[in-house]
Amino acid sequence: MNRRNFVSRVVLGGAAAACTNFGGSAYAAPSTGSFKFRFVGLMAFVERQDRSFLVATPGQSHHHATHIPFLMARKGSALADAFGMAPARGVVPAAFDTELEGTRPSDFVYRSLANTAIEVVSGTTDRVVNEANQMAHLKSIAPGKRLRGNLEKWAASTISLRGGRIENSSAHPDAGKLWSFGSHQQRLTDAVNYRNQPGATTTIRLTRGTEVQTVTIDASQAGELWMISSAAMDARMNNAMMLIHSELLFDFLVDATPILATCPMATGRDVPATELPFAAPTSATMGVIASGGTMPPLVEMCFIAAILFG
């Protein structure tokens, strides 16, 4: 199986649909699975030739809107222990995900995803069944623009998904509302759930420099991870109806003019005061948590984009 079968020059328009030789076949996936990987915040899901996905978080940007990618899990879980995840003082998970309201911050641990690659393989087919239709459709927002060729080097972190399925979710009250990018309108989500292929073994491989860690979850086991790409405090603005984060999404493309997403029905979200883990990392050694200051109470939604073949 070619793990690097990545289309680096996808054109966002009709020509993209002409690509062939897709790997694997679709299957009917039930609504539940034993492994759940929850993606929250600003990132792009890029479909590859074999219908697997590469998930990339923004790298260095000239828009002065810094996003911090990190992995989160429940303290004491097998995945948290396997990946050497550590507590982070002052971090409140409910500030990033409404599904976690009422949970205790001390029950969660973290790992920086800067300069890190993760691969998730579930079952024997590469294709990921895509049911997440509320990701920002960059093919419609910026038709005719190409995906940058150095995406994997440019991105702060990447996650490869093979097998399983993805679905719409939400972590912010403005998710699911109708947003406008100029003349293009669509509903946006800020969270996507990945679930394993039912009855299949799932392998998760994390690579950072020379460090490699692999965990295998069989069909009888359960596992849960969060991948969060959150805006640093200096990148936030108090206008919930206009998403400044939109600018970073266009950096995934070549020569695309940014268009800010707007929604007159957006209300923003009052969140608990929280620190942001790894906002200013001081060491490549895991377990060293640098904190970046408390977030303001009104935060805009960090949405997710999709670059699809069509």
Image (cartoon, rainbow, N blue to C red):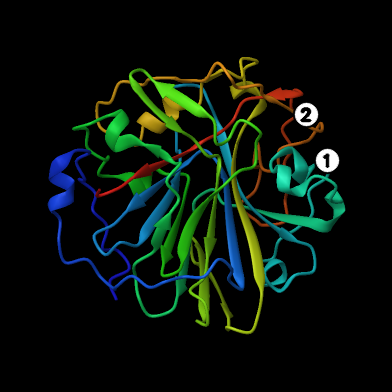
Decide: is 242 above or below 196: above
Location of residue 232 in the rendering, given as x and y in whole percent from the top left corner: 63, 30
Q: Residue at x 52, y 77 (%)?
A: 198
Tag of residue 90? 1
Q: Are marks 1 and 2 in contact (CB under 8 Å)?
A: yes
Q: Is residue 127 visible?
A: yes
- Residue plotted at (58% across, 71% down): 33
Where residue 54 appears, as percent x and y from the top left, is 38, 55
Amino acid type at mark 2:
Thr
Taking the image as drawn, is residue 117 in sight?
no
Along the polypeptide, which appears first: circle 1 or circle 2? 1
Quadrant of image for the N terminus: bottom left
Q: Position of residue 35 (x, y in %)?
A: 60, 70
Q: Which residue is mark 2?
A: 294
User: Quick one: 197 or 287, which is closer to the camera?
Assistant: 197
Q: Label 2, secondary structure: give it.
A: loop
User: Crowdedness of circle 2 by 10 Å Cα count: few (<14), some, many (20+)?
Assistant: some
Query: At which x and y percent is residue 82?
Result: 67, 72
